[in-house]
Amino acid sequence: MISFENDYIQGAHPEILGRLAETNLEPLSGYGSDSYCESARRKIRKACGCENAEVHFLVGGTQTNAVVIDAMLKGYEGVVAADSGHIAVHEAGAVEFTGHKVLTVPGHTGKIDGNELRRYLQGFYQDENHEHMVFPGLVYISHPTEFGTLYTKEELRQISELCRDYEIPLYLDGARLGYGLMSRGTDLSLCDIAEFCDAFYIGGTKVGALCGEAVVFPRKAPKHFLTAVKQHGALLAKGRLLGIQFDTLFTDDLYFRISSHAIEMAEKLKKVLREKGLSFAWESPTNQQFVVMEDEKMKQLRENVVFSFWEKADRDHTIVRFATSWGTKEEEIEELKRLL
Amino acid sequence: MISFENDYIQGAHPEILGRLAETNLEPLSGYGSDSYCESARRKIRKACGCENAEVHFLVGGTQTNAVVIDAMLKGYEGVVAADSGHIAVHEAGAVEFTGHKVLTVPGHTGKIDGNELRRYLQGFYQDENHEHMVFPGLVYISHPTEFGTLYTKEELRQISELCRDYEIPLYLDGARLGYGLMSRGTDLSLCDIAEFCDAFYIGGTKVGALCGEAVVFPRKAPKHFLTAVKQHGALLAKGRLLGIQFDTLFTDDLYFRISSHAIEMAEKLKKVLREKGLSFAWESPTNQQFVVMEDEKMKQLRENVVFSFWEKADRDHTIVRFATSWGTKEEEIEELKRLL
Amino acid sequence: MISFENDYIQGAHPEILGRLAETNLEPLSGYGSDSYCESARRKIRKACGCENAEVHFLVGGTQTNAVVIDAMLKGYEGVVAADSGHIAVHEAGAVEFTGHKVLTVPGHTGKIDGNELRRYLQGFYQDENHEHMVFPGLVYISHPTEFGTLYTKEELRQISELCRDYEIPLYLDGARLGYGLMSRGTDLSLCDIAEFCDAFYIGGTKVGALCGEAVVFPRKAPKHFLTAVKQHGALLAKGRLLGIQFDTLFTDDLYFRISSHAIEMAEKLKKVLREKGLSFAWESPTNQQFVVMEDEKMKQLRENVVFSFWEKADRDHTIVRFATSWGTKEEEIEELKRLL
Amino acid sequence: MISFENDYIQGAHPEILGRLAETNLEPLSGYGSDSYCESARRKIRKACGCENAEVHFLVGGTQTNAVVIDAMLKGYEGVVAADSGHIAVHEAGAVEFTGHKVLTVPGHTGKIDGNELRRYLQGFYQDENHEHMVFPGLVYISHPTEFGTLYTKEELRQISELCRDYEIPLYLDGARLGYGLMSRGTDLSLCDIAEFCDAFYIGGTKVGALCGEAVVFPRKAPKHFLTAVKQHGALLAKGRLLGIQFDTLFTDDLYFRISSHAIEMAEKLKKVLREKGLSFAWESPTNQQFVVMEDEKMKQLRENVVFSFWEKADRDHTIVRFATSWGTKEEEIEELKRLL
């Protein structure tokens, strides 16, 4: 049985486990105040080209979104997202749980269109009743999106400038950021993201860590953010678990190397899928690939391969997802080729 | 430098790290649905003597308290706790963040007194204005308490019966439960706790795990608890990290053995502290020991030993805390003896 | 200057003011426990054909929606509404403020389509990820809708049966209920609504009262609803203000008579608008009429008549709203006719 | 039967009802944008000596407290109050419902002691764990307090200066403010309050209005406060109901004259109670008087007089409350004298 179910089917990259074992007996202070967290912060600041960035470590993605969004919004504000955005659909209402509405604009294979966003914002302030409505207080995008797609530098610049015109901060959900940065065609770097966004997170859980997301505020974090994290039940006692993992990921470019490996595997996977005559539901330049499969074929393949149901395409076809990760092996793709 | 700062200064017990490494490459499904989580649940149910208990794994203590309390309360209810309770003081208002008041009764070195609780509940329902007040909807106790103290079986039975008379569930915060169960004088077993309480958690973070708390609902969990966990941002993607840890802790009694070791070390520590003429701020039968120290002495000792400030006792004295854990070594206590 | 701005431009129906003055000096107990509230409750129960209904009086519409919805939902649930629903758009996120998501289905001139609702509910439970999503816990409809449209008895029955199949309660926002009940073509009575819905409110603010909405739970109210009302800051100290108003409105059918008057005025208004060649943006059988007007014409008419901007129709045309109420006089419609 | 049950047993002062009737048919815009609201704001600003004050009208006291406190606090902050404060005890957890903790300091017949407040604030910032605790973000006092007591100018100044030292705003709950301002011994004026506080409200419900509280931000209101009011379900559609009432109350000093009348009646009442040998539970200089009464006596008196149970004093005695208001008549006090 081989698995392309998702990018978090395995534990952590072995180098991370090794470092956890090596440092295990050192007594360290808690809550992110230890030396490994500090070292990881320094390396992340450097990778982002932001010497003054504030970096915090949280445990998971939904948690990170809820804490950051709640901390950045004023009480009467909501967050603008694509209607397919993870926070809008698949986080069990975690943002609303903090009292804030998720305001949606149409998603285009997961992406917000700058012009549509502009029309939404203009329309909001032109509406005579807007004081009876939820103010847009933050724009949320994911990169890669839930569809595996990417913003170009120009697209992100446009959204960023628009946000700055309206004095609305821009937040990027980078649960799979590594795969976006290492995608072959992208022109968007980590430094660009730090320049264009007011907050973003570098995903660890889906890029080689046991758990953990690194939140970066390139310029200024919300006041007393640590207390907000604690209030959300999101402050890890043994902060070392996050610090050591990110310190390892940002040593010798491990984060980028393993992301790059997953991209390479995804490219091979695409080739195999294409050769086997499967059509892509949409084009994805990252580690998730979505193809349309005959239901009969799907059923048969599932006997030997794990992959994800995405949605029904039509009566007899289904869109399914194959994901690669740091742990995907070339042999597994060869094996898939044989089985298809 | 030796450290008695707290019981989470080190990583995980080596057996746990070993199991994480061994299982690292196995592809497993997420969100607590993997086989290790299932195995851990079985072992915990057995240890609790509750074949039908529902067991969920969360990451940290404040998170666990907020999720469980919010899920068990109706909208108009609050949770009753000792005024010194962790949820009342040191969780940054995480319970209030979910919309519920923490209602306090006096704490007696961390413990709720059954008779005072009875008077509070009687008084509430007798108050003609009680419909304008927050209804008590859950009773929260910690065991061991924040002061290291323990309830006797008779005390817990009294509180439990009182709660059942009022149809109010009882929830026990077991962040350091192992140390309570292995304390030399205790007459309260894990099965007793499962019998007397409607929910409790078995703390992992402070008892040998990297992170993780096992929530046990001995009879019936709140409906769709998994969704509530997700909504609070508390659902770990790689649930394996929690499942493998608890599976290891509940294999061959590891949880109890390491707790027992910490108690043994605490007893030795008590002896040393007593011999050195230090007076105890209060009697603690668990792994945390609180002594009154001259400020001058404290300053001097800190050059070689890490321990915690608790609170000022008087002008020239301070109450300080020494904690033991699975990782405390007998040599460290000998060393402390020499330094005192 | 004549005004068709909305249905709450004037104070209260004079009979209400008269009763407030007559009873003004009687000492009465507070918070809805007075004899006028009790009398109003009896009359409302009778009008609804529900001897066991529980009736509560709240002050305003957004408040009522937020309190009722929050009290009826479990923590992990959201409320399903048309995307144009008042709670989804024009209540400043009051529902989200209580922690719950507003889940939207397409609105058809304000109405939910039973078949689309069925597909949404089926789809939700079929989605393998639905435990990571917000559960539909209540269906919200408005009647009349924000567009002045009405459900037929058959349409409401279908939605009601669907809700019961899924064990999801149905809640009807009756801010303008009187106008719906007195609409000429409707086949839906107050008793039908009480039969089909699990909660609804009879709007007072927009139907002749100074303020006030009567919430009806035909069968069973949420437990301790009064405390929930207080918790939301919605419990009026001088409950008499609401009791006396609703007691008056439900004496000698005043509520229905004034609603009927507004409908009669709306029918005359429609005739005038039609005669003057204005086209209707959509057909409304209630007290709000929506017509498409040339911008030039609109500008000119505004010198003598107050009415509301609804939305831009195209470059040179606007959809505008004219509303009638208990206070609309035939002369005003004549005057409008002259001015058009 | 005569009633001293509370200060909201009757409707509104007759001048208010008269004005509501006179203006009833005028078409006015909604949500507080009408000319009566504007006029009331001007008069209130003048009475407060604050030309730039921002004034908003809300419906009730608990609502006002919840909206103002939530709007003034940052997410991670709580509000400091006396442990007997209305928000801490009798508002069904309305503040916690908005996500914020009520932090308590000891109440002294309802009052906060400046020195104790200072020690609390100093202690908070000195506590090494304060980032894991709820930050004090606002100080709440009531004037008169729930016990009818008053702050002196010097006491209020001390608290105000302390708040400014810590950059924490000060909010005064003036549900019964008129009775405090007209109390015979007070040296605290409305202008003083506007100088010392950052927000306060002038109570209408308990001082002659049908409903309504005027919130005053002497210098600067929270941004988009109107939207926050709407979000809390607290924005009244027919804002005129509040505007006309406050405009009337602040015309020809009506608010002060009726408060003064209640004080005069309270002084006569005190004399009667003293003459009849009843002892006061504590000294109150305002319209609420608290006496200790033998239970037998209480039972007997209740046949002819309505008054409130406050709390049990001992086995055979009860503390009871008598309240006067604008509607109290001298004859009623004479009658009480005869009955005692």
Image (cartoon, coloured by chain):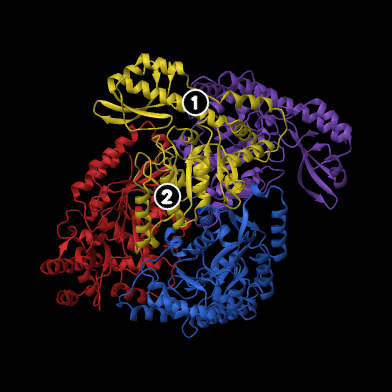
Chain colours: A blue, B red, C purple, D yellow
Residue B317: x and y, percent?
Answer: 21, 64
Mark 1 vs mark 2, CA separation in Å: 30 Å
Q: Is residue D56 above or below residue B146?
A: above
Q: Which mark is residue D261?
A: 1
Subunit that carries the residue with mark 1? D
- Front-lying residue, C64 or A163: A163
**Residue D34 image-quadrant placement:** top right
> Dividing the image into 4 quarters, which one contains the N terminus of chain D?
top left
Residue D290: x and y, percent?
Answer: 35, 29
Task: Name the residue beneath numbered marker 2.
Answer: D159
- Front-lying residue, C93 or D45: D45
- Front-lying residue, D31 or A286: D31
Asked which secondary structure carries label 2, the reply is helix
**Residue B249 image-quadrant placement:** bottom left
Residue type (three-letter) at the residue carrying disc 1: His
Query: Visible in this render: residue A18?
Result: yes
**Residue D269 image-quadrant placement:** top left
Residue C129: x and y, percent?
Answer: 52, 58
- Front-lying residue, D38 or C88: D38
| Picture residue at 81% right of the left edge, 36% below the top | C305
**Mark 2 neighbour density, 10 Å: few (under 14) some (14–19) many (20 or more):** many
**Mark 1 neighbour density, 10 Å: few (under 14) some (14–19) many (20 or more):** many
Asked which secondary structure carries label 1, the reply is helix
Left or right of residue A264: residue B76: left
